[in-house]
Amino acid sequence: MEALSSLFAGFGVALQPMNLLWALVGVVLGTAVGILPGIGPALTVALLLPVTFDLEPVSAFIMFAGIYYGAMYGGSTTSILMNTPGESGSMITALEGNKMARAGRASAALATAAIGSFVAGTIGTVGLTFAAPVLANFALSFGPAEYFALMVLGFTTISAVLGETPVRGLVSLFFGLTLGLVGIDLQTGQARFTLGLPQLLDGIDVVVVVVGLFAVGETLHVASTLHGEGFITKVRGWTWMTRADWARSWKPWLRGAALGFPIGGLPVGGAEIPTFLSYWLEKRLSKHPEEFGKGAIEGVAGPEAANNASAAGVLVPLLTLGLPTSATAAIMLAAFQQYNLQPGPLIFISNPSLVWGLIASLYIGNFMLLLLNLPMAPLWARLLEIPQPLLYGGILVFATLGTYSLNNSVFDVGLMYLIGVVGFFMRRFGFPVAPAIIGMILGPMAEQQLRRALAISQGDASVFFTRPLSATLLSLAMLVLVVPPLLRFLRASRGSSAR
Amino acid sequence: MFADLALALSVTALGACLAVGSTGISLGTGYDRIGPRFFPYLVAMGLMLLGSWLAVAAIRGNRATPVAEENDEPDLQMNWPINWSALGYLALALLLNLALMERAGFVISSSVLFWLAARAFHSRRPARDAAVAVLLSILVYFAFTRGLGLILPLGIFNRLF
């Protein structure tokens, strides 16, 4: 009940007219920048961070909450319409969403994403309000071995589910792991695979890889398959969500939220694993599994809900432990530090009006986004009618701008283009690109945990199998990789013996 | 099949390079049990195994098929020959952009990038493209530098302001 009264106090702060206005400005700005192709939520928040500096901290963070959710929403809009996600969390949304958009169902895809985001974002924020301390406690029981096992589970699920065969997914994953190795080793301070280039000492920025593989890779791929004059994706009619769409959407929304918040709340959470698990789950549970890969609405509703719920979940370790687990959260931590605030258990005591004002404005921002974006969905869908030459010209300009602005470095831009060329080959030869991003983000974390676990156990590798939680997670990871081919094999042999 | 094999071999080669590169990482003086080389070795081994697997599959005639993720319009995939002129224009656009960005400034390099990219996509209206390219670049420049406080290279306009 303590949480509830604190929340009411928070609403008292957030509902002041000036703060409401800042929340609205944040939501609009976040959506407007997030919707630019190739610029994802992390980059949007980073770009808009300086805008909030002139405000007093409480107002700044309220505006920031608006930017955060607005950027998430804008990011999924472009993912759906143009297949150029700027962050790993919206990759999965793009899978089915873009297929729907190309089939003339852009408005329905955007609507189920908007409502799903609202539902899941609200559930996630409620979860943040009440479960933060509990989750933080549970996460404290995780040792390095458990973290490592959890990441291995993430690796195998992503590789097994995306792509025709696990091998292709694994190749992509290992490419990402390779990219993640570049830079200074955190534990010993030794440079690894920097090719003698000082620009690589800090490692490769995730944004460089995401924008390269997606925006540039996609542009090259589309250009290489052009036949004669470029064509424009025609938006066939405005099909709003039908009764059947609603019936097929509401359960994925809730399931997505149920996956997204708790996993996002773990100190290794992030948005990748839950969006991914949600996609996998919806594909298993759907009555129309044949539609997956061709534009199944469950495949938009579930992952998008999971994405937004995890965005709320990510704030749990950020606020309670000061631990950022996604690129966006890392930038938010930078925002706190600009005000000389250190997130952690103490901030709830030292700055309650700020923390609870922030949480309250997450509810408000989410609601504003729904009001703003439902009527706008058909308008956003018209972005598809931009002639292809101008659209891809614009994508390249924004991709370049976003990458350059990270470190004001032309080197980054060149690296991003190079990775774009790799992305082109991956598309050409049927390798899914998403596992590469997962490998790149989780790889370094997995390595740290592996080494930490082995250091604690004095080099005894059995630690991963003797701790029950870690053993369970690793067995699950194994099952995910082994069971689907095994089932296929059994089914095939049964089919041939029946004949 | 040739291309598939070449790809498989390059995955293996990447793994091999990684393995060789790992031997050159100095170990440092940590109390670290397994050191900074262990994980790179794991990744290198994985890449080499996967590359060999792909190579075997390619030799057995297992051609690359588009994954479900991209498999939207089957006629757009694989079957069509690569449009080399489009890729050529894009390559030129990207390289010119890298060369011009800090020398000529963001507005000029972006305009060139945009215009050449439009050419790559077979635009038939070069004048319109040029107008959009310049307007967009100027608009973006001012929106992001004045509005959001980014620093974008001014290039040759440096002397004017």
Image (tube, coloured by chain):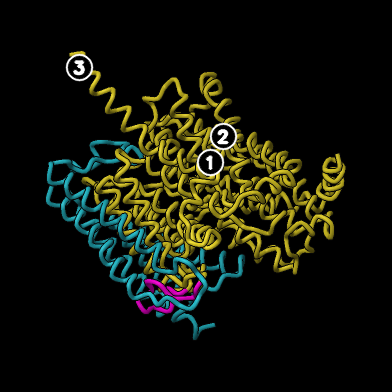
B98 left or right of A10 in image = left
Instruction: Looking at the picture, tell me which residue is in the foreground, B99 or B110.
Output: B99
Residue with the mark numbered 3: A497
**Which chain contains the residue that carries disc 1?**
A
Give the quadrant of the C terminus of chain A. Answer: top left
Q: Which residue is mark 2?
A: A256
Q: Secondary structure at mark 3?
A: helix
Disc ID at residue A443: none
Residue A238 appears in the rendering: no
Question: Mark 1 = which residue?
Answer: A274
Query: Front-most of A447 and A375?
Result: A447
* Rendered image quadrant of residue A234: top left
Q: Is residue A435 above or below residue A204?
A: above
Q: Which chain wears cyan? A: B
Q: Nearer the viewer, mark 3 or mark 1?
A: 3
Q: Does the rendering let one see residue A292?
A: yes
x, y percent for residue A365: 70, 45
Whether residues under marks 3 and 2 lie with C-beta atoms below 8 angstroms apart, the answer is no
What is the distance, in whole Å, between disc 3 and disc 2 at their CAs? 40 Å
Which chain hosts label 2? A
Badge 1: residue crowd in 10 Å (few <14, some 14–19, many ≥20): many
- Label 3 sits on what residue type? Ser
Drawing shade for chain A: yellow
Q: Earlier in the sequence, mark 3 or mark 2?
A: 2
